[in-house]
Amino acid sequence: MAAFQQFSDGTRHVHQLRVRYADTDCMNMVYHGTYAAYLEAARVELLRDAGWVYAELEKAGLLLPVVQLNLTYKKPARYDQELSIRTHILAEPTTKLNLRSEVFHGDDLLAVGDVFLVFVDAKSGRPCRPPKGMAEKMRSLGLIAP
């Protein structure tokens, strides 16, 4: 499956994963806190597939901490289900990177997460601009919502 796919509402980065037994709780549902890790995995792969590897960003002195996470749960994910996480960017990257991820099992929407990150200079600890060319690349991939 291609990492970037076209949907009726625009281009999305798609990350696939299978629910592990360790991800579930005693109710046989994915534990609510696990979704944050799922969204992080999707975000890291989106950046990698667009040309920015987290480890290289950090070596270059750029950090990208999460400052806000909003999750809405629609239906539970369960052990051994294959999930697709579709992610796009909500606004042009500035000192902030705003992402929306939708977690699907087949055609069923299970959860929606909005993640807000800030680009931070590792030396000063202060917010900074995104890497040169990032906004243009994300726009060219169609990942920035109109």
Image (cartoon, helix red, strand yellow):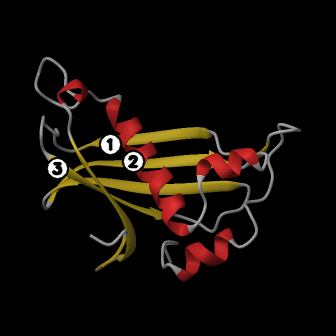
For label 3, the residue is 82
Q: CA distance from mark 1 to mark 2?
A: 6 Å
Query: Do the residues under discs 1 and 2 have CB atoms within 8 angstroms?
Result: yes
Q: Residue at x 49, y 65 (%)?
A: 49
Q: Specify whether 75 is left or right of 4.
A: left
Q: Nearer the viewer, residue 145 or 35?
A: 35
For marks 1 and 3 on the same chain, the one whose residue lies earlier in the sequence:
1
Q: Nearer the viewer, residue 57 or 103?
A: 57
Q: Residue at x 70, y 45 (%)?
A: 58
Residue furthest top as drawn:
26
Please tell me whether mark 3 sits on a helix, a strand or a loop. strand
For label 2, the residue is 113
Q: Residue at x 65, y 78 (%)?
A: 136
Residue 109 appears in which quarter of the rendering? Answer: bottom left
For label 1, the residue is 72
Q: Quadrant of the N terminus?
A: bottom left
The circle drawn on residue 49 is none
